[in-house]
Image (cartoon, rainbow, N blue to C red):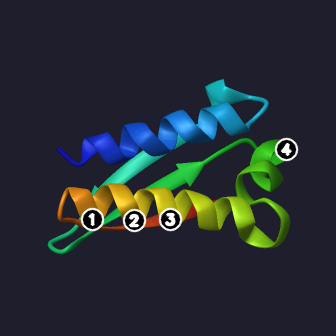
Amino acid sequence: MSSELKTLIEFVSKALVDMPDRVEVNEIEGEQTTVIELKVDKSDLGKVIGKQGRTARALRTILNAASTKLRKRSVLEIIE
C-alpha cells in the first residue's frame, strides 16, 4: 500500500529534474513511520530542494497529505 507514496515521490521528482534516469527512491518501513529516501544526480539537487528549501517543503507537504489519507506517517529525506 505505501509503495504508492514511493511512486508519487518518484513521479514528481522525475518531473522536476534534468536527469530523471538518475532519480532513486527507497522506502524504509518502520513500525510507525515510513522513511522515503530521495536520491538525485548532484547537478539536480538544487532543483529538488529549491530556493530556501521551498520545493523540498512542497514535496513533504504532498507526501504528508498522501500519507494522511493512507493513515500512515512518513518522512522525506533527500540524500546528497
Q: CA distance from mark 3 to mark 2?
A: 5 Å
Question: Mark 4 = which residue?
Answer: 43
Amino acid carrying label 2: it is: Asn
From the top left corner, tell me how far across and down residue 30 is, in percent: 21, 68
Whether the residues at callouts 3 and 2 have beta carbons within 8 Å, the answer is: yes
From the top left corner, tell me how far across and down residue 12 is, in percent: 56, 39
Front disc: 4 or 2: 2
Whether the residues at callouts 1 and 3 have beta carbons within 8 Å, the answer is: no
Image quadrant of residue 19? Answer: top right
Circle 1 Cα neighbour tier, 10 Å, few/some/many (<14 / 14–19 / ≥20):
few
Residue at 14% across, 72% down: 31
Q: Nearer the viewer, residue 11 or 19?
A: 11
Amino acid carrying label 1: it is: Thr
Image quadrant of residue 79? Answer: bottom right
Residue at 38% across, 61% down: 65
Question: Mark 1 = which residue?
Answer: 68
Whether the residues at callouts 1 and 2 have beta carbons within 8 Å, the answer is: yes
Give the position of the N terminus as an image quadrant. Answer: top left
Q: CA distance from mark 1 to mark 2?
A: 6 Å
Amino acid carrying label 4: it is: Ser
